[in-house]
Amino acid sequence: MNDELLRRLPSVDELLRSGALKDALALCSHAVIVEAAQETLSAIRAEISSNGRSEVSLQEIIALTQERINAVMRPSVKRVINATGAVLHTNMGRAVLSRSAADAAALVARNHTNLELDVETGERGLRDYHVDGLLKRLTGAEAACVVNNNAAAVFITLNTLAAGLNPLRGKEVIISRGELVEIGGSFRLHEIINKSGCVLKEVGAANRTHPHDYARAITPQTALLFKAHKSNFTVAGFTAEVGLKELVAIGRANGLPVVEDLGSGSLVDLSAYGLPKEPVVGERLLAGADIVTFSGDKLLGGPQAGLICGKKELIRRINENPLKRVLRADKLTIAALEATLILYLNKEKLSQTLPSLKYMTRTVDELDMAAQKAAALLKAALGDGFIVTVEDSESVVGGGSMPGHKLPTKVVAITHEEMPGVEPLRAARIYRMFLASDPPIVGRVNNGSFLLDMRTVDNPEDVVIRKN
């Protein structure tokens, strides 16, 4: 029987000559179709040989081949519904771009642009020019530049200001032990500092650092004093740290620049929007920091980028570092970042125009209305056996921003009731069920319930399961 089934299998040439795959030829190359057909036939042969298949039809072979072709041609980056409540979810791309930023990126993607062209003179220009003026206006910095992320901003700043002529022996960068943070993906600040060609010099203890710790550590080999904002964790109890103004005073007394990594970095005082106050870039520069680095895709609410603001002479040196070309931001980032920064020129409407800030400032009443509507839709879609309720809960900002701060929210809680003779669906299985929707719906599991947090959901209809 197996031999008979194997003999009846068509060849790849027969499949192509049948015309059943002609639509696929319009979408992809002949080689992709041949490979898909070969893989399909090979899989079927293996099933037949292992007695896992007793029949096969040409229609099934063609359908399986088409599925493989579709899988190859289908983009793996796709839209997902963020119902976790984490506004800046690292695994889901952090900040959602504003409409104007998305439009700006699409415009430069589809057209030639003046990315590095001075249209007044016809000469070559600088890509950072498009955001330099906005950053100076919004932060009060003498100059600014952009690289591809904040880790790169820290790296190139230290490499420029503190790396030695001998690649095995750079100059010293002094930092408090309590500020040696680890960011997402297990990347640690001290490793980035070491890779930049500097010598890391830790002072103080994990919980307490004093001004004299910095002063005593300074030597002729010291290049700068470094301060890192603990944006993704908090230290409570018996603690002490040296404020920026104190550190600047120590730096000035010893002729050393002070560099601060703000991590998330905010351009406005978020307390004006009812949120905890985060360090504001302009205020840190005003307090005396010579260089401040921060992210573009966290509290700023733009594309992934590393922004460097500060003294003109230091920014000039950073721009002349050959690594600037290695780490530079691309045209899509520059366009989206410029459009995002323009939104900050109208702070009164920022909570309406900047998606990340809009998500963070949504009221509980607004979220309750959305949750009630979503619950009604889900009850109808899920059918019998599912218990759908609206409950109080808490969201987080995410992305390593505002650690410990919770945002009151409303969630749709879904469980599966106990029924005679029917095994109830556990929360983890309900989670996977929603994940299999098209587009995938990502919620969270808590205390035996599957939760859909409406804070990060644009429309209640978005959380209703749709089949692929």
Image (cartoon, rainbow, N blue to C red):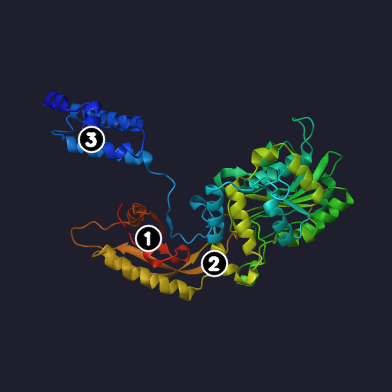
Residue under the point 83% across and 52% down = 212
Q: Looking at the picture, which amino acid does disc 3 mark?
A: Gly
For label 2, count other residues whose C-alpha is less than 10 Å away and answer few (under 14), some (14-19) or many (20+): some
Query: Of marks 1 and 3, which one's residue comes earlier in the chain?
Result: 3
**Picture layout, residue 77 above or below residue 39:** below
Residue 294 is situated, as x and y percent measured from the top left of the image, at 67, 53
- Residue that carries the numbered disc 2 in the rendered image: 358
**Picture layout, residue 203 above or below residue 100:** above
Residue extending farthest to the left is 1
Residue 276 is situated, as x and y percent measured from the top left of the image, at 63, 67
Residue 293 is situated, as x and y percent measured from the top left of the image, at 70, 51
Residue extending farthest to the front is 121
Distance from the alpha carbon under mark 1 to that under mark 3: 47 Å
Is residue 274 visible in the rendered image? The answer is no
Between tags 1 and 2, which lies in front? 2
Residue 358 is situated, as x and y percent measured from the top left of the image, at 54, 67
Distance from the alpha carbon under mark 3 to that under mark 2: 52 Å
Q: Looking at the picture, which amino acid does disc 2 mark?
A: Lys
Write down the quadrant of residue 297 in the picture.
Answer: bottom right
- Residue that carries the numbered disc 1 in the rendered image: 450
Q: Looking at the picture, which amino acid does disc 1 mark?
A: Phe
Of 187 and 58, which appears nearest the observer?
58
Q: Quadrant of the N terminus?
A: top left
- Residue that carries the numbered disc 3 in the rendered image: 19
Write down the quadrant of residue 344 in the picture.
Answer: bottom right
Residue under the point 17% across and 35% down = 58
Query: Of marks 3 and 2, which one's residue comes earlier in the chain?
Result: 3
Q: Secondary structure at mark 1?
A: strand
